[in-house]
Amino acid sequence: LGYPAAAVGGRVHVSREASLAWLVFDHPERRNAVSLEMWQAIPDLAGELDADPSVRVIGLRGAGDVAFVSGADISEFAATRTGADAAQAYEDTTAAAFAALAGVGKPVVAAIHGFCVGGGMAVALTADLRIAADDAQFAIPAARLGLGYHAAGIDALVRLAGPSTAKEVLFSARRFTAGEALARGLVNEVVPKARLDARVREAVSLKEKAQQDLENARRQEADLTELVDRL
């Protein structure tokens, strides 16, 4: 794939709760920073969950209590992004991961606690709903680090929060609290940290009830149409 050898770190894995499947970013020693290996794993995992009929909703979350995703794992950049070819291969890999998450046909809910920074913001932006714990912190520090931010992430940020907020987030590179993120439309709601996973489960339950109501309505409509045709 054009990458130099790099140390393995972290993993992305699936945890299931009935019809809810969690896609878990698990690299706690790096605040769930996403390694190259983790980026590479995302498209297949997202595709498998999207194709699984037993999965109705996909949740995104970080392992542990400290972070959702604190960005890409910059500790491996010297090995994975040095040179034009390696840098392009890395960007192609992350773009494929974001596209796979954004392209899932099922509802995706991001459960955000702690640090949601850089690439973590891009991951959260692929979700349909973002529910944040009250300790969540949001930032895109690419400008401060002298790095570019991928175009799809910028487009998603502008669509979600508008150009003014997008410029504030990108130009200032500062951290935003959960309350500030809510006020700017970056998240749908903020809940106490202890309630975060439960709130996602409640959202899943409401979605399933709405889906059942829709199916019942369609069934009743079909029955009524059949009855009318017989008259």
Image (cartoon, helix red, strand yellow):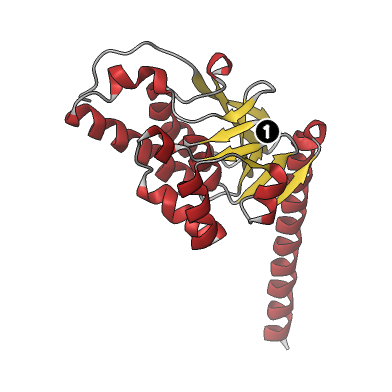
Q: In which quarter of the image is residue 38?
A: top left
Q: What residue type is labelled 1?
A: His
Q: Quadrant of residue 68?
A: top right
Left-right relation of 41 to 177: left
Task: Please give the residue where the numbered disc 1 appears in the rendered image.
Answer: 113
Determine whether 38 is above or below 202 in the image.
above
- Dot 1 crowding, Cα within 10 Å, few <14, some 14–19, many 20+: many
Left-right relation of 8 to 25: left
Q: In which quarter of the image is residue 92?
A: top left
* Residue toward you, 100 or 209: 100
Left-right relation of 75 to 178: left
Residue 104 visible (yes or no): no
**Who's the residue at 46% across and 26% down the image?**
34
Q: What element carries label 1?
A: loop
Quadrant, the C terminus? bottom right
The percent coordinates of residue 27 (x first, y second) are 54, 18
Residue 28 visible (yes or no): yes
* Residue toward you, 8 or 223: 8
* Residue toward you, 19 or 98: 98
Left-right relation of 19 to 52: right
**Who's the residue at 45% across and 32% down the image?**
42
Farthest bottom residue?
231
Quadrant, the N terminus? top left
The percent coordinates of residue 95 (x first, y second) are 36, 41
The percent coordinates of residue 190 (x first, y second) are 75, 45
Q: How many labels does the image show?
A: 1
The percent coordinates of residue 145 (x first, y second) are 40, 33
**Who's the residue at 38% across and 24% down the image?**
36
**Who's the residue at 30% across and 18% down the image?**
78
